């Protein structure tokens, strides 16, 4: 039995949630909170397996409640939110604070068909995620005197077949990032930590299991969080024209590089994902070899691990997020098991390493 705490101030929406969950014999509503403060108290008292969290709540917002819960009583949180722009930004802030997924509220039209089934299946999925005290809380504690974890360096299983970059050329021409569950926070931490003068184009696949309005707003949110030029990739854009920019895979489209330009594809999903991190990484490995860097961040499943291995085999710089800073240590773990990542570290340390190599300091180590 999966025990669910419903956090929602609307009586109509609480009824819809109760009715949907009652149809699944393995799900049990153990409590209902009408505001964020009550939600924090009930999590302490009831210790549910999953929380459905509204964002726009009286007294204490859903975002603040999420921050408290993930710092004090780590529990898988599914944000159930509307596509209103203000609420969308709060939703992404909650995902960065440790919530694990988002589901749009019913719209009152034909798109609601199957909503109850999607809710139940998503709750089942997030209930299996082993959440931890949110990484930012641990990093705050570390700044007060706790030691930094040692950097893990993973020796390659075989020498890369391609030679290193020729002297005088940039160490890499593109950085490819892949993330899933927990990705908004990890991407924010990595991009914020890059120096202002870092101008290498960054291509990113972030799995967002939500409707198009949620996904489209992600670029604006990430730009606001990081102060970077963030937008969705467009077919045919030359990579050489992307200096200083962060390009995201559009909703439900694969992003890849071919003949020096961005390509978008409607090809079949990989690992049930479109966009797929593997598709991006494999294309970057083929196109740029040792002149590229690949970073695989927090997420459930194994998308990106094989692609990162291909990047390493072609001489690329490869990184995976460490377990301690991951919301979900799934994709990076698969990469580590394959020997795909040369370095395993938190996102901010990955950014520092990229900056060092870009400036020529790290390349000499």
Image: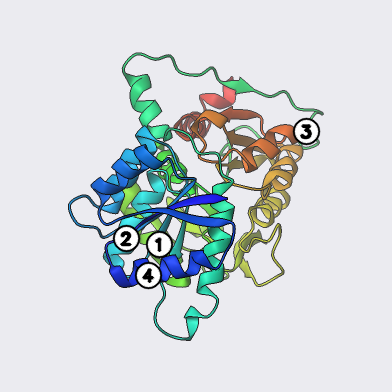
Mark 3: secondary structure: loop
Label 2: element kind: loop
Would you call the spot at circle 3 few (<14 residues within 10 Å), some (14-19), or many (20 or more)? some
Left/right placement of residue 150 relative to residue 196 reads: right
Of label 4 and label 1, which has the lower sequence position? Answer: 4
* Marker disc for residue 80: 1
Q: Which numbered disc, 2 or 3, marks the residue that appears first in the sequence?
A: 2
Residue 220 visible here: yes
Nearer the observer: mark 4 or 3; the answer is 4
Q: Earlier in the sequence, mark 2 or mark 1?
A: 2
State the mark number for residue 8: 2
Separation of marks 4 and 3 at Cα, in angstroms: 58 Å
Please tell me the numbered disc located at residue 160: 3
Q: Nearer the viewer, mark 2 or mark 1?
A: 2
Q: Secondary structure at mark 1?
A: strand
Q: Secondary structure at mark 4?
A: helix
Q: Is residue 36 left or right of residue 135?
A: left
Q: Is residue 237 above or below residue 271?
A: below
Left or right: residue 165 versus residue 362 is: right
Residue identified by numbered label 4: 15
Q: Quadrant of the C terminus?
A: top right
- Does the CB distance between marks 2 and 3 fall below 8 Å? no
């Amino acid at each position: 039995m999966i025990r669910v705490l419903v956090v929602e101030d609307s009586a109509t929406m609480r009824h819809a949630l109760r009715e949907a969950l009652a149809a699944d014999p393995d799900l049990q509503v153990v409590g209902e909170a009408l505001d964020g403060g009550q939600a924090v108290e009930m999590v302490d008292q009831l210790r549910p397996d999953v929380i459905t969290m509204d964002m726009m709540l009286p007294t204490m917002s859903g975002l603040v409640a999420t921050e408290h819960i993930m710092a004090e009583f780590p529990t898988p949180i599914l944000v159930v939110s509307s596509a209103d722009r203000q609420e969308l930004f709060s939703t992404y802030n909650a995902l960065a604070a440790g919530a694990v997924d988002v589901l749009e509220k019913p719209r009152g039209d034909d798109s609601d068909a199957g909503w109850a089934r999607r809710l139940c299946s998503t709750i089942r999925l997030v209930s299996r995620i082993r959440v931890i005290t949110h990484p930012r809380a641990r990093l705050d504690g570390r700044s007060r005197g706790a030691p930094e974890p040692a950097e893990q360096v993973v020796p390659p299983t075989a020498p890369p077949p391609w030679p290193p970059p020729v002297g005088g050329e940039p160490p890499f021409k593109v950085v490819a990032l892949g993330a899933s569950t927990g990705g908004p926070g990890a991407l924010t931490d990595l991009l914020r930590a890059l120096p202002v003068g870092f101008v290498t184009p960054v291509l990113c696949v972030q799995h967002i299991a939500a409707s198009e309005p949620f996904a489209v707003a992600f670029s604006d949110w990430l730009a606001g969080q990081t102060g970077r030029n963030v937008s969705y990739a467009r077919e045919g854009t030359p990579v050489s024209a992307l200096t200083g920019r962060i390009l995201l895979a559009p909703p439900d489209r694969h992003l890849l590089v071919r003949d020096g330009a961005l390509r978008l594809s409607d090809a079949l999903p990989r690992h049930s994902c479109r966009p797929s991190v593997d598709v991006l990484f494999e294309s970057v490995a083929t196109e740029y070899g040792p002149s590229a860097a690949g970073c695989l961040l927090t997420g459930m499943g194994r998308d990106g691990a094989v692609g990162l291995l291909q990047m390493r085999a072609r001489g690329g710089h490869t990184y995976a997020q460490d377990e301690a800073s991951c919301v979900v240590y799934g994709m990076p773990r698969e990469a580590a098991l394959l020997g795909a990542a040369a370095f395993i570290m938190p996102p901010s340390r990955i950014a520092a390493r990229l900056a060092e190599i870009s400036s020529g300091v790290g390349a000499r180590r």
